[in-house]
Structures are given as C-alpha cells and as structure tokens.
Amino acid sequence: MEINKNQLLRFTTAGSVDDGKSTLIGRLLYDSKSIFEDQLASVEKTSHQKGIEGVDLALFTDGQKDEREQGITIDVAYRYFTTPKRKFIIADTPGHIQYTRNMVTGASTANAALILIDARNGVIEQTKRHAFIASLLQIPHVIVCVNKMDLVDYSEDRYHEIVDQFEGFSAKLSINDIRYIPISALNGDNVVNKSENMNWFAGAPLLDLLETIHIGSDTNKIDARFPVQTVIRPQRDGFIDFRGYAGRVSSGIFRVGDEVTVLPSGFNSKITSIYLGEESIEETFANMSVVMTLEDDIDISRGNMIVKPNNQPEQLQEFDVMMCWLNNRPAQPRTKYSLMHTSNETKTIIKDIVYKMDIHTYIRIEGDSNIQMNDIFRATLKSAKPLFVDNYRNNRITGSLILVDDATKETVAAGMIV
Amino acid sequence: MSKYYLNYLDELEAEAIFVLREVWAQFQNPVILFSGGKDSILVTHLAKKAFWPAKIPFALLQIDTGHNFPETIAFRDELVDSLGVKLIVGSVQESIDKGRVAEERGKNASRNVLQITTLLDSIEANKIDCAIGGGRRDEEKARAKERFFSHRDEFGQWDPKNQRPELWNLLNGKHFEGEHFRAFPISNWTEMDVWNYILRENIQIPSIYFAHQREVVWRNDTWIPNSEFLKLEPNEEVVSKKIRFRTLGDITITGGIESDADTLAKIVEEVAAMRQTERGNRSDDKRSETAMEDRKREGYF
C-alpha cells in the first residue's frame, strides 16, 4: 500500500477569529474531503441556528463548550487530515496575546507555521507576534497566507504591499524559509484549488505547498543523541543477561558497531544491537523509538545520554535560555524549580533575568525582572547537576526544556537553550 | 524521499512507544484501560513493542458493564493469557449492587455513564496513578484538546481549561497523592491510521469487527445488536443482517453497519470510503452536542 510510505507534516496555525483562521482550516478539511457526513450535518444545524446561510466552515474547528459560547478558541486543538500525498496534523492555536503560551506549545513540534494576514488590515501587531514565535521556536517553514483577498478585489498591488511589509520586519528574525500565498479561505481561492480570480499569482495553492514542502531536512542528522528513557531487563528465559537501553533518538544516526560514549560517566562502549520491538535492525535515526544494547556492562540509567565520542553535547550547569512563561503564578527568582530536559531531571533556579522581549517591536527590555504569564525573556539558569545540552537552533530536542513548579506540579515555563 | 525520515505510521508508532515508556518511567502503578476494542488492543500491542523482550509492565484494567459482547470477553482472556499480564476487572454491576450508582431507566438506558463511578473506584482501590487509554483526538471534538499526559484531580475530574501545556516531547506527570493521570499514547492517530497499522502489523482483533451475520434492531439510525439486555419497542423488529462494528462499547448502545468487509484489507478499504465518523453509531455521543465533554469532565475514559 503506497500511502503507507507517506510522511507526516505537523503545522501550526495562529490567528484570531477575525482573520479567518478557523475558516481556513474548515476549508482545508472540507475541500480535502476530511469532513464526515455527521460532522457536516451537525455544523449545518448549528450554522442554521446562528442564522448563517450555508455552512459556517469555522464551526468544524470550534471544540469546547466555553469557547463556542465565547466565540473564541482558547486552547490548542489538534486536527487531522490526509491527502494521497501526506498526513497532516494541525495544531490550531488562538492568536491573542494572552494565548502566547498556547502558540508556543503548538509551535514546539511543528514543521511549518501558517501565519494569516487579513488583506484589508495588512501586517498588524499580531502578525509580528506570530512571526516572532515561529522564529523563536525555530519552525523550519513559514507560510504567510494573505487572506480575504476577495475583500480587496483580488488586488495584486495590495498583496505585494503586504509581502513587502512582512519582509520588512521579518528580516530581523531568523526564519529560514518563508513563502507567501494570496488566498480567500471563505471562497476557497488558492486553498486547495488554484484561484481563477488571481491569475497573476504564479505559485501553487496552499495545499499543494503543504503536500510538497521538503521536510526531510528538518531533523538533525549529524549530532547523534540518545537520551535513555528506561532500562529494559527482562530477567526471563532466553534473556537472562539482556540489558537494553530504551529511548527515542533525538537526532543523528546510530549503527550497530558504532563506538559510543555514555554521559555523564564518560565510559566508552560499542553498540552490539538495536531493536525495534522484536525486530533487530542495523541502524536507527532521529525520532525512532528503539532499544540498544552495548558491549560493556556499564551502569546506565534514565537521564543518561548515549552519544558519539567525537561529537558530544556540552555539559553545563549554568546556561542561558530564551523562555516563555506559561503559568498564572509569576516567575520567582531564586526559587527552586524542577527542570525537565530530555529524560533528565534536576533542580534549578532562575539566576538572572537578562532581558524581557517586546514581541511586537522586538526590542529588549533590560532591568525588568517581573515575569508574568505569556512573557518571553532571556534568563540564566543554574542547575543542581550538569545537563547535556545543545543549542536549540541546532537541536530542538536536546536544546529544549521545561520548568515545573514544585508547589503546584504544573509546567510553568518553556525554555530554549541559547 | 529522504532515507532518514520516518513515514507517518512509523512516526506515530515511535511517538506512542515513547509515551508508553514515559508512563513507565514517571508513574508508580500505571495500568492500561482495556475495553477489548481495537484502540486498546492497539495500545497493548504498542506496549509489547515498547518493552520487548520484557513483558508489558502494566496490568490491564477493564471496566465491565456486564453488557458485553461475548466475543470480546473471550478475546480478552486469550490476550491476557498470551501476554502473561495481570487483569483487573471493575464491575459496574457491583457498583449498582453496592448502591454506588443507580441503573438508568427508559428506552435508551445504558450503563455508559455508570462506568465513570466504577472506573474511579477501581483507580482508587488499586492505587493506580496513571490509566493509559486508547483515546484519539480525531474521535470527538472534546478529545481534540486532550494531552498525552492528562491530569485528573483527586475527584477524578478533568479541567479542560486548566491543562498543562505540552511542549516538544517533554511530558510532565508530576502529581499530588490521590490525583492521577490519563495517558493517551495514540492521541495523534486517526481511525484510518489505526486500521492501516493493524493491517500492517497483522494485529489480532475481536471477530465482531469483521462482517458477520447477526440479529439486530434498527434504532437511532443504526443497527443495535439483539441481546438479553435489549428491551424491544412495540414497533421494533429483530432482523438478521450482515453487519460489522466500527467501535466497540456496551452492547446496548454500539451500533453496527451493514458491511461485507470480512478481512482487514477490506475493512481498510471500507473505512477509507466512509462518510460517517465511527462514533456516529454510538448513541452515547448523541445525547447532546457536548455529551463527550461533559462525561470527560466527570472522569470518563
């Protein structure tokens, strides 16, 4: 079955109700025939109750009771659709500033970000916020959808004006791949089908782009990192001496026979086998969940990392991170938090707030250590034991961490190692 | 296509295995919620892969409504036996007998909602700190916002507005005594993905998923199986149809569809062409627009 060879693309959409984000997602689902009859019937019924003629596409993505009453999306909602070319996961997040944390959450696993701009309004504060988050979280591909082109008479000039605006400020960010598409989500122009109203646009419609954008290079294939999740010791017939290290490869490639170094002990050994379930395999690479066995009997436990002798992460106890504060309780300097990084965990304190970031002007605010929910800032962390870290720019897995408040057990901050 | 890039089924599998191992590493006494349906069978299969050559380190917990498909129970016993895992059964009948809950009345009465109490009682009695479920985000709109690690307070309740953010692959299972978690390793799978994977891995599933001849009654726009628990209305008639089930729940509320799909390959083909969601045949979800969310808040699966 050919379809089983397809790749998975995760993308995030950020925007407010007004710029037609829900309508766009509804359109993608509807036109790619991912809406089922009973879902359609339910949405038609609700549309009718609201006095809307036809189908309100936005209703396909409005999930929970509260938000339907308020007419807003408050959390990250995940949507799925499949085309003959790819499977897609949409992390649908609200665009309002008070939901920065949700945008950050959705962005953390995305291959691509869709940023919606209302063609009538052009680039607004919110656009800059979304672009900043895409850059901060290092989403590999950004697709700027200039929406509601029908309301500006499908004007090519207006489209170029907005593209220029976006390029003007995004030059300050670090986004590797930016694409632009003029669309009308409401009417379906350039969403799934090429628009007849904008013949001046030579590019492909949005779905085409999502289906073909090259994601094979999005993972790090150079730096071999294997955080040990748990040790497998079956202690049953046939496997009495079996000692396997289970984990998910963060990046790079490991092969049977490779020389490896175990951190933090620094002991060297050799990979003797790699298993995926019962199947013995010769090599493993980023994102795979496997079990490895080593030639030497070394004491290895959860939180250790298997790497290559000639390519090791840094072992640091004090380091700088870009952080997003996710919790109602403000950040407490000099308070102990639990830090989770790969499969490792330690206590940490926020030693210093280096600066806060104004995510609309991209200006750094120094000397303000009052950190509230949704704030983005640079901090120096000091941890109780060394962590095996890479720069987030090079490695989204070994470069990322969260802080947990021991008083509430809640996840209070997301951090990207600089 | 890049050589070092997973296809989507392999990626979903790797993600689920990762989540299962995190559960094992972060909790003291996790169990798999086992309904005998394809999703919990899939989770069990993935757990087997995650810990091989060791045995699955979780017990299976089944909430038994007493209104079962006989085929499911036979299947369950065989599976438990072959895996060598412990089975814990929480009985809704027992909850009724003890007066913890009262049987619903009326034509569409079911034991669906009653399961919540039995489930929460079983979690408490067995000191379970994480119950692994086969819930998927594509199933239902309230589930679209579920986390991999989903927190439940000491009353077993879910607060959809106050969920922990989940970033990258960092799962936070920290909790206070008396609280527990639900873990959903196959969150990102769709019905189609589940079937494609079952086909690929040739996973054994109960016979009722395959087309078979059965006595049924047309009710609530679906074929409800005839059973000792079904009270027939005067205008209802028991007929024999070739049907199969897309989901598997309480026998009183799980509707079948007419089908000739009697092999996995045919089921995959049929599901691909479906124009109704699988839960469209579940009367428990039809009670109101927010039926699932309301039950989930209370502690439902």
Image (cartoon, coloured by chain):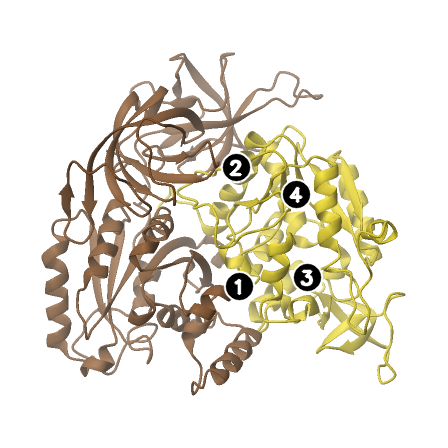
- Rendering coords of residue A70 (x, y %): 43, 68
Q: With respect to residue A247, does B220 lie above or below?
A: below
Q: Earlier in the sequence, mark 1 or mark 3?
A: 1
Look at mark 3 in the image and give the residue it sits on: B247
Marks 2 and 1 sit apart, C-alpha to C-alpha, by 24 Å
Q: Amino acid at mark 2?
A: Gly
Rendered image quadrant of residue A322: top left
Kindly report which numbered mark, 4 or 2, lies closer to the viewer in this rendering: 2
Q: Which chain is yellow?
A: B
2 and 1 marks on the same chain? yes
Query: Mark 3 or 4 closer to N-term?
Result: 4
Q: Amino acid at mark 1?
A: Lys
The residue positioned 72% from the left and 48% from the top of the image is B119
Marks 1 and 3: which is nearer the front? Answer: 1
Q: Is residue B23 placed above or below B157 in the rendered structure?
A: above
Instruction: Compare marks 4 and 2 and give the one earlier in the sequence.
Output: 4
SS at mark 2 in the image: loop
Residue under label 1, please give it. B141
Q: Residue at x 46, y 61 (%)?
A: A80
| Residue A351 % position (x, y) | 27, 26
Q: Return the residue at label 2.
A: B173
Dot label at residue B44: 4
Quadrant where the image shows the C terminus of chain A: top left
Whether residue A31 is visible: no
Kindly identify the residue that appears in the image at 16 percent across and 77 percent down: A200
C-alpha distance separating marks 4 and 1: 25 Å
Check if mark 2 and mark 3 are on a common chain. yes
Q: Are marks 2 and 1 in contact (CB under 8 Å)?
A: no
Q: Colour of chain A?
A: brown
C-beta proximity under 8 Å, tags 3 and 4: no
User: Seen from this angle, which residue lies furthest right?
Assistant: B228
